[in-house]
Image (spheres, grey):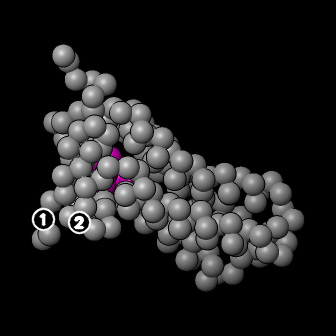
């Protein structure tokens, strides 16, 4: 196994060796998190798929799916910036839920023939990967004895 990463998450050191792209990296900002990076890739794919053909004309589904994908990366970022592990967990939970929302909406897009089965599999796989990364991070934070600055007693 690779060495453990010492990370500020948020404001407390945690082991995120499975959460960072470079297992030796120190997470100092949300952009360093692999789950946020993969969430960004998911959002790019959703935007690419939803700007074509009849999908582009289905404003409600297009907007909802784009919002859900944006929610994934935004909640990871906002939770990280909050400065407390309990709040971070709540935002990560919302990000994980948004991954499920994207996957569910993909079925609607597939059923309406807005996307191909290959596109469905690729985007769904991306959303599931982000969900698993977020879930692993949530598990780590729950088990960690370290807490963010907001919850430390002076």
In the image, 121: left or right of 106? Answer: left
| Residue 1 part of the magenta-drawn span | no
Residue 144 is situated, as x and y percent measured from the top left of the image, at 19, 41
Please tell me which residue is depicted at 28% across the width and 37% down the height of the picture: 11
Residue 59 is situated, as x and y percent measured from the top left of the image, at 83, 57
Q: Which residue is mark 2?
A: 23
In the image, 10: left or right of 107? Answer: left
Q: Secondary structure at mark 1?
A: loop
Q: Nearer the viewer, residue 60 or 25?
A: 25
Sequence-wise first label, 2 or 1: 1
Please tell me which residue is depicted at 37% across the width and 39% down the height of the picture: 89
Please tell me which residue is depicted at 79% across the width and 75% down the height of the picture: 52
Instruction: State which quadrant residue 36 falls in.
Output: bottom left
The disc placed on residue 3 is 1
Q: Is residue 134 visible?
A: yes
Rounded to the nearest angstrom, the CA distance separating label 2 from label 1 is: 7 Å
Residue 20 is situated, as x and y percent measured from the top left of the image, at 31, 62
> Which stretch did the figure color magenta?
134-139
Question: Measured along the vertical axis of the image, is residue 35 above or below residue 2?
Answer: above
Main secondary structure type of the part rendered in magenta: helix
């Amino acid at each position: 196994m690779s060495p453990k990463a010492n990370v500020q998450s948020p404001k407390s050191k945690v082991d995120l060796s499975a959460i960072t792209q470079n297992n030796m990296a120190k997470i100092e900002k949300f952009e360093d998190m692999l789950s946020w990076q993969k969430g960004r890739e998911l959002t790019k794919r959703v935007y690419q798929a939803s700007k074509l053909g009849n999908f582009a004309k289905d404003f409600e589904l297009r907007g909802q799916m784009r919002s859900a994908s944006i929610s994934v990366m935004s909640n990871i970022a906002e939770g990280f910036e909050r400065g407390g592990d309990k709040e971070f967990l709540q935002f990560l939970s919302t990000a994980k839920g948004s991954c499920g929302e994207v996957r569910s909406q993909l079925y609607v897009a597939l059923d309406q023939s807005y996307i191909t089965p290959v596109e469905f599999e690729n985007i769904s796989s991306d959303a599931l990967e982000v969900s698993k990364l977020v879930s692993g991070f949530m598990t780590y934070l729950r088990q960690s004895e370290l807490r963010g600055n907001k919850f430390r007693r002076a």
